[in-house]
Image (cartoon, coloured by chain):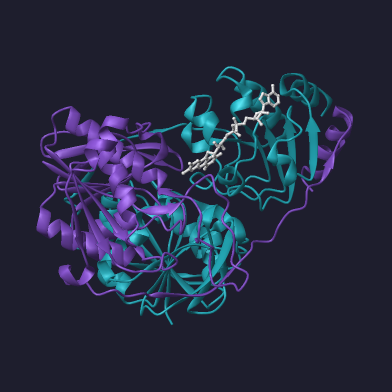
Chain colours: A purple, B cyan
Amino acid sequence: MKILVPVKRVLDYNVKARVKADGSGIDLANVKMSMNPFDEIALEEAIRIKEKGDAEEIIAVSIGVQQNQETLRTALAMGADRAILVVATDDVHNDIEPLTVANILAAITQKEGPSLILCGKQAIDNDFNATAQMLSAKLRWSQATFASEIDVEKDKVRVTREVDGGLQTIDAKIPAVVSVDLRLNEPRYASLPNIMKAKRKPLEEISPADLGVEMTQRLKVLETKEPGSREAGLILENIDQLVEKIQENVGG
Amino acid sequence: MKILVLAEINDGELAEDQTSKTVSAAATLGEVDVLCASNQCSDASKKITKMANVENVLVLEDDLFAQSLAESYSETLIDTIRSYSHIFAPSSSFGKNILPRIGGMLDAMVISDVSQVISEDTFERPVYAGNAIQTVQSTDKIKLISVRTSNFDSVPLTGNAITKKIDCATKNTLTTFVENKIQASDRPELTSAKVVVSGGRGVGSKENFEIIEGLADKLGAAVGASRAAVDSGFAPNDWQVGQTGKVVAPDLYVAVGISGAIQHLAGMKDSKVIVAINKDEEAPIFQVADFGLVDDLFKAVPEIEKKI
Ligand SMILES: Cc1cc2nc3c(=O)[nH]c(=O)nc-3n(C[C@H](O)[C@H](O)[C@H](O)COP(=O)(O)OP(=O)(O)OC[C@H]3O[C@@H](n4cnc5c(N)ncnc54)[C@H](O)[C@@H]3O)c2cc1C
């Protein structure tokens, strides 16, 4: 079985996003970029599945700018076998919509023939939480979102999902698209020897046109602005004052 | 314009708050139809017919919908859905699971987590864990909108909608339900509670979390948690508040032993009043709190509980 893992290059989760003064978006010039944390978890899971002997090959895919190469090198160093870079734009500020990403991934899936696609449940920049679901619809595959446990069986994956009420377990027929949540695993760090080895692993570069996918954008971003901000309030002296404040605001 | 709202129903039970607030967001644009699909619909559909601004309730009673699997909706209902110009769903785990799949089927983008409906094609939504708000205009023929329900009020129960039974033909052969692990609780629901008391890593253990629960019960509050508290096993996953957990906006939010990471703030900074208890006066949570107490939680929280 082959596993496909899409990885997105995003503003590092420790860096505070700054809105550009002209309202055109978030400033991404000269800031630290990293692999989307959810995608790291998806990749880690794929590696564990392969280590258990349930998969033969892991293909990491990234869609975006040329520099996404770095994200793919990280993926290769963690344990992906090969990588595909889809250069879809030359401007890092141009976020590719989940629908287009799903179209590109569907085309790659036709070509590469994976039986399982593991995605992060959301990208921490646009927060859409949509690519996995759209991709599985495009492929007419089964979908299992927000996974906190994945068991690969013969012709199905058993997935425990984090839902609002607690946990839900479902069986998804293989081929399947699974989106992963935070508690699935803790991703490993790439070791130095593996980082060196990753430099020799294959990284193929293609364009959306090579896959016959048209780049469209359905949502026009009219404005990006700062959210309403909160002011720091009062530091109280003692517990009695706090009790008073709590009582004032309960049922108020 | 023809607007459809997907009612969230879990095993026959209507998620009333989520559904009503979604109707409220959709009703900014006009009267709506509501799809009520579940294994048991009589109770849920009765409640929905009373919601203001609802014109028709489409009732589809079939075991296929008991567990709200995405494929049940996308594979079987796509023709019904396609006849509308706007589809709204709550941006809960229910809506987030189903709506983008419908988007994939219809080749339409989903507009997730909408916090404001500006016009029939323009919406506001938070991005970057709420560090920016984007205004987006959709060019899709069918608009798929998931609603950040904490930003909307419920609709009044003054409606008198018409119920219409509908059928579906095909079946979901892709996924099957195995089991739910859902803890019943007498506490108010986290996303609609007027008061929320949340604990973080500072609480230290599952046993100690009873301090948080004790204060919550005294206040008639829901209990929340930071990711660190959930990851450490102090609290169940459905208590997590934040960018990847639940978004809450109660009248009062009490954060105990929570540092105030961006990802946590994303889920609670629209609360009316925020109270923070933390022993570290430098903790970022104090920058958003209306009232702060710099103290050891193990001393402060039991004393507060006693005095209230
Ligand atoms: C992709 C991604 C998504 C995330 N999503 C979320 C999310 O949805 N929700 C979320 O909460 N986090 C989320 N996080 C994690 C987030 O970045 C923080 O790590 C987390 O919120 C920290 O939780 P905490 O405040 O409980 O723990 P810490 O940051 O460790 O803070 C513990 C606090 O407790 C205080 N404390 C300790 N002992 C005491 C005591 N005895 N009395 C009083 N105070 C005490 C300390 O001073 C400290 O401020 C996410 C992270 C990533 C990367």
Residue B27 visible to the viewer: yes
Quarter of the image that includes the C terminus of chain B: top right
Q: Is residue A224 left or right of residue A210?
A: right
Q: Residue at x 24, y 57 (%)?
A: A85
Q: Is residue A247 above or below residue B38?
A: above
Q: Is residue B20 above or below residue B106?
A: above
Split into quadrants, the picture shows ligand 1 in the one at top right
Q: Is residue B101 left or right of residue B305?
A: left
Q: In the picture, residue B297 is in which quadrant? A: top right
Q: Is residue B288 left or right of residue A199?
A: right
Q: Of residues B91 and B169, which is closer to you in this image?
A: B91
Q: In the picture, residue B107 is in which quadrant? A: bottom left
Q: Is residue A213 above or below residue A183?
A: below
Q: Is residue A112 left or right of residue B267?
A: left
Q: Position of residue A141 (x, y in %)?
A: 18, 54
Q: Of residues A56 and B204, which is closer to you in this image?
A: A56
Q: Position of residue A212 (x, y in %)?
A: 16, 72
